[in-house]
Every structure is written in structure tokens, then in C-alpha cells.
Amino acid sequence: MALQELVNKLRAILPHESVLYETEDLRPYECDGLSAYRQLPLVVVLPHTEEQIVKILQLCHATRTPIVARGAGTGLSGGALPHAQGVLLSLAKLNQIVAIDPLARIACVQPGVRNLAISEAVAMYGLYYAPDPSSQIACSIGGNVAENSGGVHCLKYGLTVHNIVKLRVLMINGEYLEIGGESLDSAGYDLLALMTGSEGMLGIVTEITVKLIPIPEKAQLVMAAFDDVLKAGNAVANVIAAGIIPAGMEMMDKITIHAVEEFLHAGYDLDAAAILLCESDGSVEEVADEIRRIYAIMQQSGATKISTSRNEAERLKFWAGRKAAFPAAGRVSPDYYCMDGTIPRKRLAHVLNGIEKLSQEYGLRCMNVFHAGDGNLHPLILYDANQPGELERTEEFGGKILEMCIHAGGTITGEHGVGMEKINQMCIQFSKSELEMFHAVKAAFDPMGLLNPGKAVPTLHRCAELGAMHVHRGEERFAELPRF
């Protein structure tokens, strides 16, 4: 369909100002938080009702026009990268909290509601929404569902999938689908888990019912400094081995500590090779006992300096440094590339040493900040896109980190999704039969492949072209992983 004809049909559904197609109007939508990948969409639409989305989907379905859903644009894997010949569907205007039930401890919200806004709205009931990505002041709950986001407290409280009970979804043909329910269990297959983390490839989520939990009576944090990353990694394992599941347990390496401290002055030890933040929450008695035990474990694990937050302001200050790691990286480097791999906790020191070797090999600095408790790494590769070849070298470095995570028994993503960023590494992580099954699931929901096409799940042809598959005794298998 010609652009003007498509625009005219869309403007029959939406107000004229809600259909954008001029280049200068499209430019703000050319990328998500992964700005290294950019693509202008054919047209952007900004509906404000579910009925409008139904009509948009029906139009795209009838004309076979690709459609990419977008939330707040804070994603870090290129999951909301537009399609050059498609419609970019912004859900930003669907930003209402539909209902709050403090007795059932649930809230029904639209996808454009900010993550933090949920907790702000239910605080009067002594409740909050647990998943807290670093971008929670800006990221939308719809985007969190699309990527199955986590946050610094996901160790104890889980990812998005563990904190939602029901989704209202529109299929590509405009039909409604209600997944999950407010009861303890639902009949049929667990489509709620399937839809969460599906990166907008199966349907458009228009309502999310989230779980709410009581605000803890007390929260306290232990900050431990170590002169060796291996000791810090062992401390993480020692805490978990002691039967303690902290509310959050985060680690930062030396380069990250310096970048954050210069940016925010959070009180971090600049002599440390690594800093571990370990928080306990619950009743006053529970926290006092758990903090005492954590403090002792840090001492036994070789911490050179240990601080305990004395009040709420100091606790938030310690966390502010961790949550400011990404903007701090922007102060010390023209560009940074944030990775998102997950490994078993016991392989933490091994993988960090491997990243250091790769950093030297590629001549690029790398800040390591991650959810230590569940092994979710966030290496930030620092580079300058204005230097010829540096972006390509950075992408190759990042790919090697992900391959190392797979080899360590982990996976290529923990909470950022696959999007465009990691699609090549999907060829390494999964077998031919597994990828075929992923494509079958996609086809069951979206037979024409119009929803967010070309993302997350690579074609077998792509994998073969990359050389990630080889033929062995007549059977296609994936190439062996490199060892680090």
C-alpha cells in the first residue's frame, strides 16, 4: 500500500495529529534505548483507546502491513526497532490505572503506565509493585511485560512474569484474548508465561493485572568492599548457601565504582576492586537477624570494609549509586553498549575474568554491574561510535560475552530480551528443532508474521549463513562454542 493511502486510512481511525509520517516527526521513534541500531518507520500511530488499536490491527492485517509496538522506548535490545515498511504503534497514551483492589492486592493497569507510578498509586494502601528496573521512573509496564523485566529486587520477588496474574491481549486480526485470571490457577496451557517476554511478537497487550505486596516494615542494606572480584563472587555464593535470600544483591567492579562515585557521590570505597550491595527486608526482628548474619558472612568472605545503612535516606543513597550506573557510563564514554547475559552464580568469577581478557583483546573498557544474586550480568562496553570500526568491534566483543555465558551454562538474556541485539546468538544457544518450535508458536498467534517481524527468533537460513550450524552425519547441528 502506498504511504499516503495508508496515512489516509489510519486518519480515518485516529485524529490527524495522532498519525505521523513526516521524517522530522518520525525521528524520535527511530530507536529504543539501544541507539546503535536505528531505523525510521513508515508511519507512527498514537492511539488512546483500545478500540482504536483494534481497528489499526485489522487494517494492518487486511493490508499485510508489519506493525511494531512501542512502550516508553527504554528497552536495551532493539526490541522496539521500527520496520521500514511498517507501522510503529505507540502505546504511550494508554496510561491509565484502571482499578486497584487493595484487599485482593492487585491492580489493573494499561500498558503505558510507568512502572514506578503503580507503586506511587497504591502506597496509600501500604502496598507496592515489586519489580524495579533501573529505568522504573520512565519504563512502561507494557514494555516490562514484553521483555519480562526484573530489577535489583528480582532475586527475592521475581521477574515481571512472577508478579502479574492476567493480561488482556489483542491478536493481529483485532480479536481479544484474556490470559490468566485473578484466581490461584487457570485452566489450560500457561499462556501467561508464554506471552510475558514474547517481545511484542504474539499480540498487543492492552491491560495488565499486577500483584501488589505489602511494603516491608523495615529494609536495611549492607555494603561490602572487596580487594578482589573473586572474593566478592564467593561472598555472593556464601550468602545464598547460608539459606539467606536477600531482597537484592548487586555487584559493581572498580571501573563502575569510580564512574558512579564521581557522578553521584554515593559513598563507595574507591580503593575496592568490587562492591557488593546486599539488602534485607521484612519485620524489624527478621531484618536485624538477617543483617547480622550477612555482615558476618561478608567478614568471613574477606571484605575489606563493611557499612550498614543507618536510616532510609542512607539506604536509598547506596541504591541510587547502583541505579545510576548507566547514566554514569554516559559521563565517562561517548557511547556504551549494555549487555545482558545470565550465568550460574558459581561461574561468576570465571566469566568476569573472561570479560577482562576480552576487554584487553579488543582494546575496549568494560564496566561490570549486575544482579549478583541471580547471575544476571550487565557488562557496559565503552566505545566511541565516531571512531571507524569501533562499533563493529564492540558488537563482536559483546557477542563473545554472550557466547561465554552460554558456555558457562547460562543464557544470552536475563531481562532485556533478544530483540535485534542478540538474534545471532540465538543461533548458538538453540538447536534447529528448538528454533522450529519457536517459529511454530509464532505462526499459531501471527500466521502472516506481521507483529514485530525479524526480531528475537532467527530464521534457520540466517543461522546457516552465519555459520552457526554445520552438517554432521546428515543432521544439522550447531557449531561448538568457543572456550574462554
Image: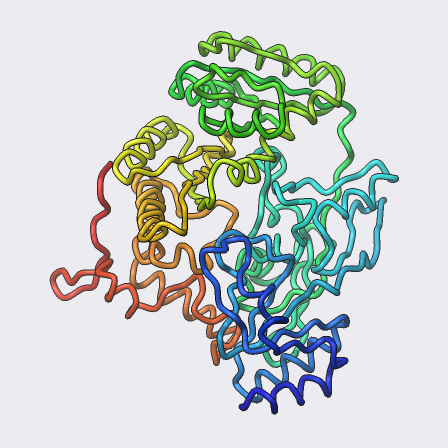
155 to 100, vertically: above or below: above
163 to 354, vertically: above or below: below
Q: Residue furthest right?
A: 124
Residue 24: x, y in percent?
61, 71
360 to 11, vertically: above or below: above
- Of the pair 461 and 312, the residue shown nearer to us: 312
Q: Residue furthest left?
A: 473
Residue 266: x, y in percent?
63, 23
253 to 188, vertically: above or below: above
Residue at 84% x, 56% y is 99
Number of numbered discs visible in the structure rendering: 0
Residue 178: x, y in percent?
68, 67
Q: Is residue 29 left or right of residue 370?
A: right
Residue 284: x, y in percent?
76, 17
Residue at 51% x, 51% y is 76
Q: Is residue 276 left or right of residue 353?
A: right
The quadrant of the image that shows the C terminus is top left
What sort of colour scheme is used for the picture? rainbow
Res 20 → quadrant? bottom right
